[in-house]
Image (tube, rainbow, N blue to C red):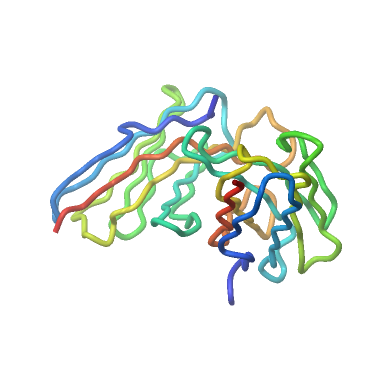
Amino acid sequence: SQQGEEDPQALSIQEGENATMNCSYKTSINNLQWYRQNSGRGLVHLILIRSNEREKHSGRLRVTLDTSKKSSSLLITASRAADTASYFCATDAKETSGSRLTFGEGTQLTVNP
Amino acid sequence: DAGVIQSPRHEVTEMGQEVTLRCKPISGHDYLFWYRQTMMRGLELLIYFNNNVPIDDSGMPEDRFSAKMPNASFSTLKIQPSEPRDSAVYFCATGPSYNSPLHFGNGTRLTVT
């Protein structure tokens, strides 16, 4: 099964509202990354948070990481219609040798204008 | 920077035919990954290369799949013979170093009839 599991699977909000997506994982990690995927396109990296960090900001994005609960959240503030996309968390597990990101199943976010 | 370039964008073929997917990585990125995305299984890592050398091909589904990276600017993923269950979007992604965020191409949508 996937290392990361996003919650909820789908989220529909109005423009201007905040959107929160959660990710849970199973093993110890080096870092956790969030990606966005627009329909018909490749994934785009949004933000990386290391295992020794608890919170990180980038523009309207805020990511938290709780390694004791093996969970992360992505908050998008003041959402826009252009934020409509699928959002994936990806974990870099400590046990695996080499470089091997494992992606969750994603949250489909719809921002209604 | 043109980003990761994949070709073709769409491929429709009949069962039993050979399919070759192509990827041109970002110059200077030493890591190259091939992923497959389906609704049922999400994003799966098939194989990755470091400095043109295959490091982990444990995700390759079976012997019908093969990948090569003859030089730093080109990689191929070949399926021979193709089957309907191979229908998916195949992504190439690259990164400059170990555990760095990945840059994805826009994928090849493969349909095997």
In-front residue for pair B107/B48: B107
The quadrant of the rendering that contains the N terminus of chain B is bottom right
Q: Residue at x 36, y 44 (%)?
A: A63
User: Along the horizontal axis of the image, is B34 left or right of A22?
Assistant: right
Residue B106 in picture, x, y percent from top left = 53, 61
In-front residue for pair A76/A31: A76
In-front residue for pair A19/A60: A19
Residue B5 in picture, x, y percent from top left = 62, 68
Q: Residue at x 36, y 57 (%)?
A: A58
Up-down relation of residue A68 to residue A78 (above or below): above
Residue B93 in picture, x, y percent from top left = 62, 56
The count of marks equals 0
- Residue extending farthest to the bottom is B1
In-front residue for pair A61/B69: B69
User: Along the horizontal axis of the image, is A15 left or right of A3?
Assistant: left
Q: Residue at x 65, y 57 (%)?
A: B95
Residue A98 in picture, x, y percent from top left = 74, 40
User: Along the horizontal axis of the image, is A82 left or right of B8?
Assistant: left
Q: Residue at x 61, y 66 (%)?
A: B4
